[in-house]
Amino acid sequence: MKRIRELLATEAGAPDPRQHQYTVMVVLAAVVTTAAGWALDLRTPALIAGLTAVFTLVGAGGQSLRADLRRFVRLAPVLVLVMAGGPLLLDVPVLAGLFVAVIVFGAGMLPALGEHHRIVGQTVAAATLVSTTTSIGTEQSPPMLVGSAVLGALFALLLRIVLGLGDPTRATRAAVARTLVQPGPGVIEQSAAVWRADGGVTWLGQVLAGAARFRAARETLLAQAQRANRTEADRLRQIVAEADLVADELAKAVRSRSCTGLPSLARMNPADSVVQHGTDVPDTVRGINEGLHRVRSAVIDRDTTSTAPATPGGTRQRASSAVRAHLSFRSSLFRHASRCTLAVAAGLVLVFLMHDPSASTLLLSLYVVLQPAARDSMNGALERTGGAVLGVTALAVVITLLPGVFLLVPVAIGVMLLGVDQLRGDYRLLLGALIGITVGDQAMGVQRSLVDAAISFAANTAIGAAVALVVGFVSYVVLPGSLVPDVRGTVRATVWSLSELLRSVRAAGRGVEPRQALRSAHVLALRRTQDLLGMPALLEGADGAEIEHGDEATVREAAVALDALRQDLATLVFRPDLELAVAVPALQAVDTLLGGDTTATIPDVPSSNVPATELLASSLLENALHARAAIDQTLGYPEPWKSYTISFVRPERLHIR
């Protein structure tokens, strides 16, 4: 009940009328469609409509109303085509196999373009597997399939409008406010992406710029505390703790729809309660104060105009770089996408040969075992296999025994609509819910005894899991790659590639670097950061890996920080040339940090009227500080901030073919 109350409340804890309306609409829709489905024999069309609504909200939601509506226009027709066309393709197995293989491979490659593209790809892949391999809707006519899918997409659109109509920018403000309260690498990049998708409102951009400067100064102060004596370190950490309290109050003001004034705590100087009057304070504290002051001014003034747009061509260039970086067996992302595609193709052959309703869970369980969200990893596959088989068996037994079990499917669809945010954040949860719905729908139509039904579903689920295991592990031998994760080598290669990209960006700002060389540097950095992002999945559960290669969490932090650095640099390139001067001091400082210099100081990032570039400059420094600390731990140095030199044989030429 506590969780339900939280979902139906605003950030301040007050009842949220829009959430109540959303919940009421979902419950009423579930009741009406259940009654109409059984009375008019429209149970399958109602199920298709419900699943389409779930997929649409998962793939097109999560940001402001304006951004979500833009994504809805692009994604909804694709989902309608998949949900309506999938059952029709079963009559042409070759075409169905090609369709599923292309979707699965594309979904495996989309993480190279960012987090949102990863969610969209995995959502479309799940919809494709459900519509093409579970036999749901095969008895329906094409007009009925299209009509059901369209109604589901329109219902999802109605739910999203109802939820966001009263406060369209609520998600954007919440994402921006998170930069003031959530430490760690990559936070600025995620929030900035949400802000840009909502049109780049100036005051929120100024908050992001101030928060980025605050975070960079905060990390610098913590780095200085690591090198100071005990008394000085305690004082610096206390200043950081006081600054966090001020930032928390400012975050509440950012999340609110309007602001007529700030509480006294939000206006406080963090160092006043720690440093005695007349005592010198580190220069870095000035950066904290400047960042917080920038946030205060932006929150009170609230300039709602839009910032200057990026230079045209940025999205196209980043997509082109991603294709060049990952269409190669040297890319861990490409290897894992190929592995998933091969396994799904093998599973499809079995499904088409069986012609058994209980085989409906084979492909979904296979996909769960493959864990497509993890790059180049099969760790934990045996555990996921056991969980999938036991879960499907238990569900088949419950469906066969309990009366009134026909209500299970509409209840499950309703719960999924109410928990869209959780499904968007956990792909395994989404696949598990789809397996449950598939078993529930198919088991009710199978005229078999309890034992036969349980054995059939369990056996087919085990077959799917076995296919995933065989293809997954055999591909490690066939496809080029290493069974033993080389964490240190990957970290060194990633740092070197980012250093090359950073120097190319600096040279491009002076007009002396050819664009082709800059693109090649970005391609290499993109491949290297994606390889490092996949390293924690390889370390998970590996015997002795934590001792030899460092803690899994530390490797993940280094990977996220270095990938965030790459994103900042790639975005910075496409800002107007006149704005690049704002980022020059930060670029120089980051180059020094990655090169092994032990000095941790915050450069002057001038406050300007270009918050989009200013926030990138400060974010560069913060991510470099996170990366430097994590790299020192990963490479096994006992003393923090120990100077090191990235010296190794150049792994490949900069020109990428």
Image (cartoon, grey):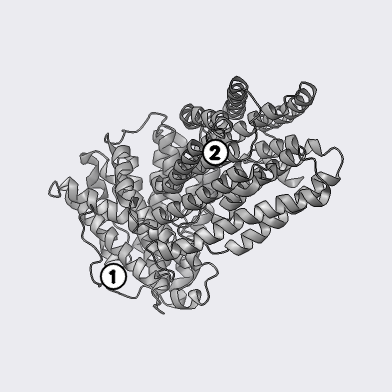
User: Which residue extends farthest right?
Assistant: 403
Between marks 1 and 2, how big is the CA–CA gap? 48 Å
Q: Position of residue 596 (x, y in %)?
A: 28, 70
Q: Position of residue 289 (x, y in %)?
A: 41, 53
Q: Position of residue 74 (x, y in %)?
A: 46, 29
State the residue position of label 2: 128
Q: Is residue 626 left or right of residue 603?
A: right
Q: How many marks?
A: 2
Q: Are marks 1 and 2 in contact (CB under 8 Å)?
A: no
Asked if one can make out residue 363 in the rendered structure from this viewpoint, the answer is yes
Give amino acid for label 2. Answer: Thr
At horizontal 43% and vertical 43% (from top left) the residue drawn is: 106
Q: Work out whether residue 489 or residue 77 is closer to the camera in this orientation and state it.
A: 77
State the residue position of label 1: 596
Label 2: state its secondary structure: helix
Q: Is residue 85 left or right of residue 35?
A: left
Asked if one can make out residue 217 in the rendered structure from this viewpoint, the answer is no
Q: Residues within 10 Å of mark 1 (few under 14, many from 20)?
A: some
User: Which residue extends farthest front?
Assistant: 353
Q: Which mark is residue 484?
A: none
Label 1: state its secondary structure: loop
Q: Work out whether residue 63 or residue 44 is closer to the camera in this orientation and state it.
A: 44
Q: Position of residue 465 (x, y in %)?
A: 60, 56
| Among numbered discs 1 and 2, the one appearing first in the sequence | 2
Q: Is residue 532 left or right of residue 388?
A: left
Give amino acid for label 1. Answer: Gly
